[in-house]
C-alpha cells in the first residue's frame, strides 16, 4: 500500500507518526511474549514512519529555502 503523503497537512502527518509508533510499540511488546504471524509488520511500520518523517523534513527544508529567498 502506497501512502500519498504530499496531500496531507502537517498535523495529519504528526498524527500518523504517533499512530505508527504506537502500532510498532504494540507489535514489539506483543511479539516478546509469543510468536507473531506477520513478522514483516515491524519492518513495514518502521519504513512508514521513515517515509512520514522524510516528508516532514522535506517540507521544513522547503519552508526555510522560501524564507531565505524573500
Image: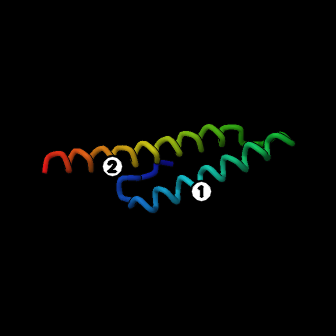
In the rendering, at what x and y percent does residue 12 appear?
A: 46, 61
Q: Where 23 falls versus 9 (above or below)?
A: above
Q: Where 41 falls versus 16 (above or below)?
A: above
Q: Is 39 left, or right, of 35 in this rendering?
A: left
In the rendering, at what x and y percent does residue 63 appear?
A: 27, 50
Q: Is 55 left, or right, of 38 in this rendering?
A: left
- Residue 67 vs residue 33, the one in the foreground: 67
Quadrant hosting residue 11? bottom left
**What residue is pinned by disc 2?**
59
Q: How is the image coloured?
A: rainbow
Residue sitting at the far left:
70
Q: Residue at x 58, y 40 (%)?
A: 46
Local crowd size for mark 2, using a 10 Å CA cut-off: few (<14), some (14–19), many (≥20): some
Q: Label 1 vs label 2: CA separation?
A: 20 Å
Q: Is 27 left, or right, of 17 in this rendering?
A: right
User: Closer to the N terminus: mark 1 or mark 2?
Assistant: 1
- Residue 67 vs residue 10, the one in the foreground: 67
In the rendering, at what x and y percent does residue 45 appear?
A: 59, 44
Q: Is 39 left, or right, of 9 in this rendering?
A: right
In the rendering, at what x and y percent does residue 42 appear?
A: 66, 40
Q: Residue at x 45, y 51 (%)?
A: 3
Q: Secondary structure at mark 1?
A: helix
Q: Residue at x 50, y 41 (%)?
A: 50
Q: Which mark is residue 19?
A: 1
Amino acid at each position: 500500500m502506497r501512502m500519498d503523503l504530499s496531500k496531507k497537512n502537517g498535523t495529519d502527518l504528526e498524527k500518523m507518526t504517533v499512530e505508527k509508533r504506537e502500532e510498532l510499540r504494540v507489535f514489539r511488546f506483543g511479539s516478546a511474549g509469543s510468536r507473531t504471524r506477520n513478522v514483516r509488520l515491524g519492518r513495514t511500520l518502521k519504513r512508514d514512519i521513515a517515509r512520514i518523517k522524510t516528508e516532514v523534513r522535506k517540507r521544513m527544508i522547503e519552508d526555510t529555502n522560501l524564507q531565505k529567498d524573500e
